[in-house]
Amino acid sequence: MLKQRVRLVLALAAAVAAGWWVAQPGPTIALFTDSAKQSAASGLPIVMPTSGGRLEVSTVTVYERFKREDVKNLLGVELPILGTTETHLQLRTVYRYAIEMQRAWPIERHGDAWVVRAGEVKPSLPVAFDTRDLEHYTREGWARFNAMESSVDLLRGISPQLEQRAQSPAYRQLAADAGRKTVADFVRTWLLDQKHVTDASKTRVIVLYPGEDVGQQE
């Protein structure tokens, strides 16, 4: 009889304890939870060794025109009344642009593209020109006899003027735009030779010049 009472008391105590546990506010215990993993794909940095030197990336061909007007001076005062000697010259000019190659050229993987940071595109000096297309015309003033002298002076000044034109923003932009394809083809060939890619024609290469970032070329 005593044992039955003890069991009854224990059962009641257990029931009260269970009721108190349910009644008390507490954190919700979830039976199922999610397990997530997050990762970031990093690029594949590689180094393309080169022999250094210069890589010619583009040429800009232009028919350049030059003009010289020569007026007689007397004590620093021009005397146009004696006539003016005019000399005109036109020739085919070939501006060549190249990039200084470093011994190690870093290439990075950026998504589905390969990114190479090339050097600055610079003109090769002195500028080349082809005299086979040379056009020349000189007209002397009525009291002038210096057509040959004027022509020689004009010719002497051509190279410095061509160097200035080679540095012009317009020509350099043309050279840089064309140079991207040359550099990209160069890199594709190397990637294919090193078996980093299997199809060079489907390999996207982004060429960056100093001061540029990937977003500007994508």
Image (cartoon, rainbow, N blue to C red):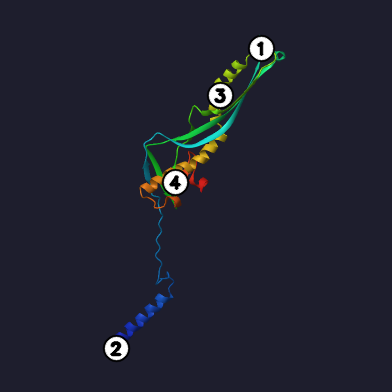
User: What residue would you read off at disc 3?
Assistant: 158
State the quadrant of the N terminus. bottom left
User: What residue would you read off at disc 2?
Assistant: 4
Q: Marks 3/2: CA distance?
A: 123 Å
Q: Nearer the viewer, residue 153 or 204?
A: 153
Residue 84 drawn above or below residue 2: above
Residue 30: which quarter of the image?
bottom left
Q: Marks 2/1: CA distance?
A: 140 Å
Residue 142: which quarter of the image?
top right
Image-based side of 41 in relation to 66, left or right = left
Type of the residue with mark 1: Asn
Q: Nearer the viewer, residue 147 or 45?
A: 147
Type of the residue with mark 4: Val
Between circles 2 and 1, the one closer to the viewer is 1
Between circles 4 and 2, the one closer to the viewer is 4
**Is tag 2's residue or tag 1's residue first in the polypeptide sequence?**
2
Crowding near the residue tagged with mark 3, few <14, some 14–19, many ≥20 C-alpha atoms within 10 Å = some
